[in-house]
Amino acid sequence: MTTGQPRPPRSHRRRRNRLVLVVLALGAVAALVAVAVVVVPLVRPPGPRPLFQLPVACGETWQLGTYPGHDDYDVDLFPIEGQAWGRPVLASYGGTVTVAGVNGSLGGRTPQDPDGPRGRGGGYWVKIDHGGRWETQYLHLLEAPMVEVGQRVEQGQQIGKVGSTGNSGAPHLHYEQRRGWEKVEAHFDGAPSGITHDDTEYTVRRTSNNCVG
Ligand SMILES: [Zn+2]
């Protein structure tokens, strides 16, 4: 043993090997936990569709519409009577608020200045997790949402007011229903909305049965 590096005593080497094994085992456990906590909930099949209601006041009739470039299944709601500004936006179904904030930028469109500077994105918005991987989204609200992230909301509970923040031409509610990874045709009171594609501009009318709040 006169040439080469002196080798560390065997016991040191064994201790180092044991340390490597412990680190590898911890890494494997962390990976398994990540899979269980993050991946499994995302790949499990969605639950049955909740009985969503129109996100506006009980008994009111609203026009639901879309236009080319909107996005398939996206619904824009306008009241057929009265001003849209400030109208109550209601939770379509019970759930937990997962987003309550600003998407993009607010811009400056208000009831006092309806043609003010246009913002970007969804403006003030709310997202609700209804369980079973079902979600709803409510965009362009007039003011900061009336709910907070983590808050439990009941069906029919007011979450905000109709406005024109973000990329919005006129006061209205942009609304979406999502199942798992994908947007789906919105259903209200158990019936499909009829807003299924954005190839052309078209509208339907629906009356709210969101009457339990
Ligand atoms: Zn829209």
Image (spheres, grey):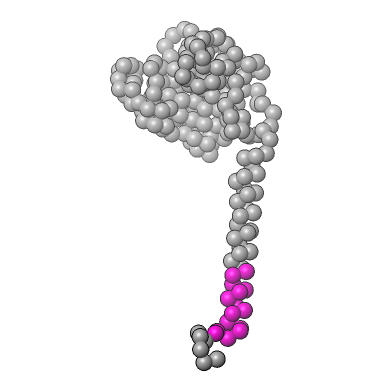
Residue 196's place in the image compared with 34, above or below, is above
Q: Is residue 15 magenta?
A: yes
- The quarter of the rendered structure image containing the N terminus is bottom right
Please indicate, yes or no, whether residue 55 appears anywhere in the rendered image: no
Q: Quadrant of residue 94?
A: top right
Residue 126's place in the image compared with 58, above or below, is below
Residue at image location 63% in from the left, 58% down from the top: 29
Locate residue 201, reporting x and y percent.
49, 11
Residue at image location 63% in from the left, 64% down from the top: 25
Work out whether residue 197 or residue 187 is closer to the camera in this orientation and state it: 197
Outermost residue toward the bottom?
2
The prevailing secondary structure element of the residues shown in magenta is helix
Q: Would residue 116 appear left or right of 43 to someone viewing this image?
A: left
Outermost residue toward the front?
3
| Start-end of magenta stretch | 7-21
- The quarter of the rendered structure image containing the C terminus is top right
Locate residue 50, reporting x and y percent.
65, 26
Residue at image location 62% in from the left, 22% down from the top: 52
Please indicate, yes or no, whether residue 204 appears anywhere in the rendered image: yes
Q: Would residue 130 appear left or right of 148 to someone viewing this image?
A: right
